[in-house]
Image (tube, rainbow, N blue to C red):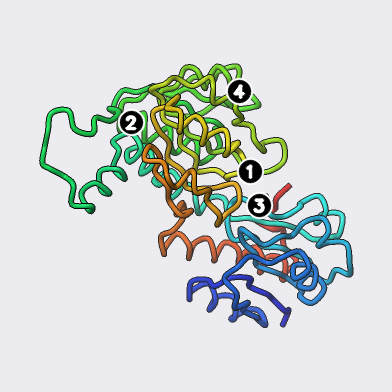
Amino acid sequence: MKKLLITRAMPDATIAAAQARFEVDLRESMDGMMVDEAAAALADYDVILPTLGDQFTAEAFAGDIRCKVLANFGVGYNHIDVDAARKAGVAVTNTPDAVTDATADLAMTLILSACRRAGEGERLLRSGLWLGWQPTQMLGTHVTGKRLGIVGMGRIGQAVAKRCHYGFDMPVIYYNRSEKEVDVPARQVESLSALMCQADIIVVTVPGGGSNTNMIDAAMLAEMQETAVFINVARGDVVDEAALITVLQEGRIAGAGLDVYAREPLVPQALRDLENVVLLPHLGTAALEVREAMGQMAIDNLIAWDEGAALPNLVN
């Protein structure tokens, strides 16, 4: 049997599927792998099932390499230097289709929560300070009919667009670096700036890392309307976190909903102190059946490699 390292605790079904095919070592730490540990794993195992937070940087690939596949658990892989992996002869796969609907559902959770001030309202009630219904109490943003702007019209972006257009009668605009035809009524705009200034609700769904790092910077945030709401279900490094904190502190946008952060699990105190932002602990795919599907997809990629077949979800 080939040796497989699973770098984090996984659903029981994933562990069972892995053990049925490979000699499996289960890493006990809940923290992501540091570079030196990742390098050692690459030298010791035939295949590895890593996930977010495991630092497979270029430095990790500098030594002896035994590993042939990194079957990433998750669609995002900005914690893996894919170019360095390719040069070292290590294939990288991910789990794209399994996460689409769950992440889009979570985006809707954040849209509704941020617009209707749900987090703030729950804190008020739990504090014992709620005095009863009042006509002007906690007035938020009405969601139905608002213009949605999506940054990155891939699988998740299109799933969000469908929910918003068909469920909430929202006209949809989107920014994508390349021309993209979609099967939901939506209009592609020519620039990110054009999207930021036109949308009432902005949802970011682009991959993290690379040229997308800080693509939503201070200048782009300054384009937003004061009544607009910003939602990020992509990766934290896509947004200039300090600049976002500033516009929220100064009330230059109505609010935000975040599931991801620049230096997870660290969330700046300044962000946690704000009332006009909904903060979730990276729950995008946190449903058992979704995580089981992700795990099975990762295992299927490893089985394909073991059988000498094409990898179903190879990252190019």
Tag 3: amino acid = Tyr
Q: Which mark is in front, 1 or 4?
A: 4
Q: Kindly identify the residue that appears in the image at 35 percent across and 44 percent down.
A: 109
Could you tell whether 135 is left or right of 272 in the image?
left
| Residue labelled with disc 4 | 219
Mark carried by residue 101: none
Q: Nearer the viewer, mark 2 or mark 1?
A: 1
For marks 1 and 4 on the same chain, the one whose residue lies earlier in the sequence: 1
What is the total number of numbered labels drawn onto the structure image? 4
- The residue to which callout 2 is attached is 166
Rounded to the nearest angstrom, the CA distance separating label 1 from label 3 is 8 Å
Horizontal arrangement in the rendering, residue 240 relative to residue 230 (left or right):
right
Q: 10 Å neighbourhood of mark 1: few (<14), some, or many (≥20)?
A: many
Whole-percent x and y of residue 301?
65, 63
Pointer 3 or 4: first along the chain: 3
Q: CA distance from mark 3 to mark 4?
A: 27 Å
Q: Amino acid at mark 2?
A: Tyr
Whether tag 1 and tag 3 are in contact, CB under 8 A, the answer is: no
According to the picture, the residue beneath numbered tag 1 turns out to be: 208
Q: Amino acid at mark 4?
A: Ala
Estimate the x, y position of residue 210 in percent, counting from the top left: 72, 40
The x, y position of residue 138, in whole percent, is: 23, 34
Work out how far the residue at label 1 is from the one at label 4, CA to CA, in angstroms.
19 Å
Given residues 31 and 145, the one toward you in this image is 31
State whether residue 84 is above or below residue 258. Answer: below
Q: Which element is circle 2 on?
A: helix
Residue nearest the viewer, comparing 241 with 185? 241
Q: Which residue is mark 3?
A: 77
Tell me if 139 is positioned left or right of 194 in this view: left
